[in-house]
Amino acid sequence: MSSEARGIAFYLNAYRALLKVGMALMLQYRFAVLIWGVWGFVGPLISLAVWTAATQARGGEVSNAATGATFERADFAAYFLTFMIFSHLTMSWDAFEFAYRIRSGSLSQHLLRPIHPIHADAASNLSFKAVTSAMLFPIWLLLIVLLQPTPPQSWGSALLSIPALVLAGVMRYIFQYALAAVAFWTTRVEAVNQLYFALDSFLSGRIAPLSLLPGLLGAAAHFTPFRAMGAFPVELALGRVPAAEILPGFGTQLFWLIVSVVLLRVVWNAGVKQYSAVGA
């Protein structure tokens, strides 16, 4: 067996074991996991309520003459419900937990393992999403029935949103892991995290569809990693990405994915060299 095949087999076996542990842990704390999952409803539903009110105040629709985008109540329902589901499937919390490992020194035991800590954390993340998605699926269906969102404009485009969602999830996870690694230099990273999530809220489409943003802000958002991680898969699922922009959209995702990998390697390698196991 080649060394490459042995490497693939090693990671497959590692993930099989890590996912079993992760699933067992999540099922052990089912109620707490459900509460964490339901928390993801808050932001999109608030945004939906705000834009629904704006739609009613403007005679039934909100539009942006610069982009030609028009949203009615059902369009906003489709957008924010899709964003809610996709955001849940791409979420990550490592940026908030990693600093604790540095302060307590518990990172040391992870560094002694024959596999990068990101793999165990990714397996835990996937386990959480699998368990919570099964729990939340009936609630998502109920919201779709109650809110009656506009169906996708193109089912072909909706299918393309699946690989876009996978790329967005991987990219978001790696970006946030690189952000978490900033804790190697400062154990108080709350301000950095809040700045990141503030930018993410505005530029990923979490607060408003990017096509409704004014002027340069809306144009600039299309070239940031936040759109590639957030709005692009959602817009693709709803058929709101013009055919000529689909391939460049995937190209932007791949570009930022490469950037995220390089960034993580640079930040991680530099950080580990000066790690001093604060609480060990």
Image: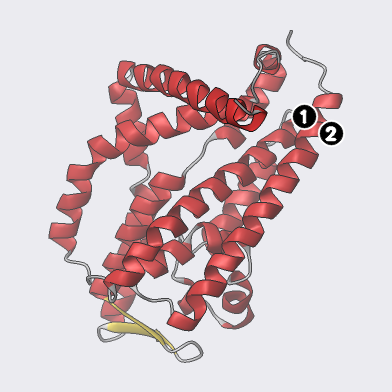
Q: Check whether the beta carbons of the residues at disc 1 and disc 2 lie within 8 A of each other.
A: yes
x and y percentages locating residue 174 in the rendered image: 61, 43
Residue 106 in the image: above or below residue 45? above
Residue 36 in the image: above or below residue 276? below
Q: Nearer the viewer, residue 215 or 94?
A: 94
Which residue corresponds to mark 1?
184
x and y percentages locating residue 162 in the rendered image: 38, 57
* Color encoding of the figure: secondary structure
Picture quadrant of residue 217: bottom right
Q: Nearer the viewer, residue 248 or 180?
A: 248
Q: Residues within 10 Å of mark 2 (few under 14, many from 20)?
A: some
* Residue sticking out furthest to the top: 280
| Residue 97 visible (yes or no) | no
* Residue sticking out furthest to the right: 274
Disc 1 is placed on an element classified as helix
Of mark 1 and mark 2, the one earlier in the sequence is 1
Which residue corresponds to mark 2?
270
The residue that appears at 28% across and 76% down in the rendered structure is 153
Q: Nearer the viewer, residue 180 or 12?
A: 12
Give the amino acid type for the residue marked by disc 1 in the picture: Phe
| Residue 16 visible (yes or no) | yes
Residue 264 in the image: above or below residue 227? above
The residue that appears at 56% across and 43% down in the rendered structure is 173
Q: Residues within 10 Å of mark 1 (few under 14, many from 20)?
A: many
Residue 154 in the image: above or below residue 64? above
x and y percentages locating residue 221 in the rendered image: 59, 70
x and y percentages locating residue 230 in the rendered image: 49, 59
